């Protein structure tokens, strides 16, 4: 887990010891020595830091298993890797059950949730980075479906991911009237399974983040389509355990550098087919 803060305390103790023994044989007489040694120790602490990112491994394009390479990848994981490269940290990608994400972050088994995590409506539940993506919740249907608008969902079975932003939106007061028209609102831990159920006809619609829907459409050409009007809009941010401002500030500092020098947009271009460049928040 994050080792930097313990190392910083050790650095402080070393500095006090050096000042107390300043006249001993071999001690530096330079006034800059403690500061230089502290900086060296801080750099060494950075090299030992393991940054554990929790993510849903079935949430493309933000985090998923690439079946060709058998490695976890995605937009958010690429951002996390670049950030760790710059800070000298080691990235540990930890797939989690999305239903258990709060327990994972509260226990300290992960340092953050960086995986298309909805900030809107959850502002008081975590310590957050600045929002970095504008997201829409959309309705996906089979390509040959007669459903054209949200009004056509009346008496239809709609499915979404458990504990997802789409579920939060549908359970909100703003969408209570729409939800009330459904024959049933189902939940499943995996969006992949949701789309499989859609394809087989077990359900008639999937409420889903637009990036995930576009990924499914791209990888299942001609099978699905998205209704024109989103049912909700929101923003994504990186979630840290409530009160962990120190780690949040380190991550935010480096992310801001990546955004300013164009690296974030360059990574987003890898997911242009999922519309990520247009969804980025590029200004604070």
Image (cartoon, rainbow, N blue to C red):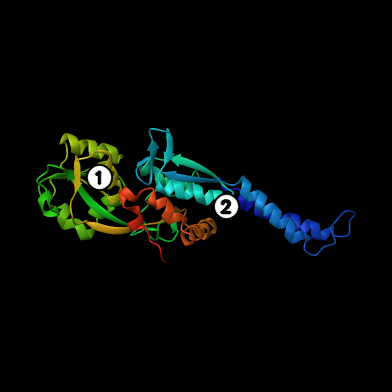
Identify the residue position indicated by label 2 in the image.
87
How far separated are the C-alphas under marks 2 and 1? Answer: 37 Å
Taking 130 as reference, is 232 left or right?
left
Image location (x, y in percent) of residue 2: 57, 48
- Residue 55 or residue 188, whichever sits in front: 55
Tag 1 secondary structure: strand
Say the numbered circle drawn on residue 160.
1
Tag 2 secondary structure: helix
Kindly report which numbered mark, 2 or 1, lies closer to the viewer in this rendering.
2
Which quarter of the rendered picture does the C terminus lie within? bottom left
Image location (x, y in percent) of residue 44: 67, 49
Crowding near the residue tagged with mark 2, few <14, some 14–19, many ≥20 C-alpha atoms within 10 Å = some
Question: Nearer the N terminus, badge 2 or badge 1?
Answer: 2
Q: Is residue 53 visible?
A: yes
Say above or below: 2 vs 253.
above
- Name the image quarter holding residue 229: bottom left
The residue under the point 40% across, 44% down is 74
Q: Is residue 238 visible?
A: no
Image location (x, y in percent) of residue 112: 47, 50
């Amino acid at each position: 887990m994050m080792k930097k803060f313990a190392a910083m305390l050790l650095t402080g103790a070393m500095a006090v010891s050096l000042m107390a023994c300043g006249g001993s044989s071999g001690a530096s007489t330079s006034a800059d020595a403690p500061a230089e040694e502290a900086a060296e120790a801080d750099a060494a602490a950075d090299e030992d830091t393991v940054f554990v990112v929790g993510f849903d491994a079935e949430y493309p394009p933000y985090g998923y298993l690439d079946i060709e390479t058998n490695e976890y990848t995605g937009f958010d994981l690429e951002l996390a890797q670049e950030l760790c490269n710059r800070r000298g940290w080691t990235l540990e990608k930890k797939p989690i059950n999305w239903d258990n994400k709060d327990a994972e972050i509260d226990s300290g088994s992960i340092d953050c949730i960086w995986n298309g995590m909805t900030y809107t409506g959850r502002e008081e539940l975590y310590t957050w980075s600045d929002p970095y993506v504008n997201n829409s919740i959309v309705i996906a249907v089979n390509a040959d479906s007669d459903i054209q608008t949200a009004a056509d969902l009346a008496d239809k079975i709609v499915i979404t991911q458990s504990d997802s932003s789409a579920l939060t939106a549908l359970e909100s007061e703003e969408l209570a009237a729409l939800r009330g028209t459904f024959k049933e609102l189902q939940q499943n831990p995996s969006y992949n399974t949701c789309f499989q159920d859609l394809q087989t006809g077990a359900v008639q619609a999937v409420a889903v983040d637009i990036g995930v829907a576009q990924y499914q459409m791209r990888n299942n050409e001609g099978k699905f389509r998205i209704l024109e009007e989103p049912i909700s809009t929101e923003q994504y941010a990186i979630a840290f355990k409530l009160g962990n401002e120190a780690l949040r500030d380190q991550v935010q500092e480096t992310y801001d550098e990546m955004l300013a020098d164009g690296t974030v947009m360059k990574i987003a271009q890898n997911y242009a087919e999922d519309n990520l460049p247009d969804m980025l928040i590029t200004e604070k």
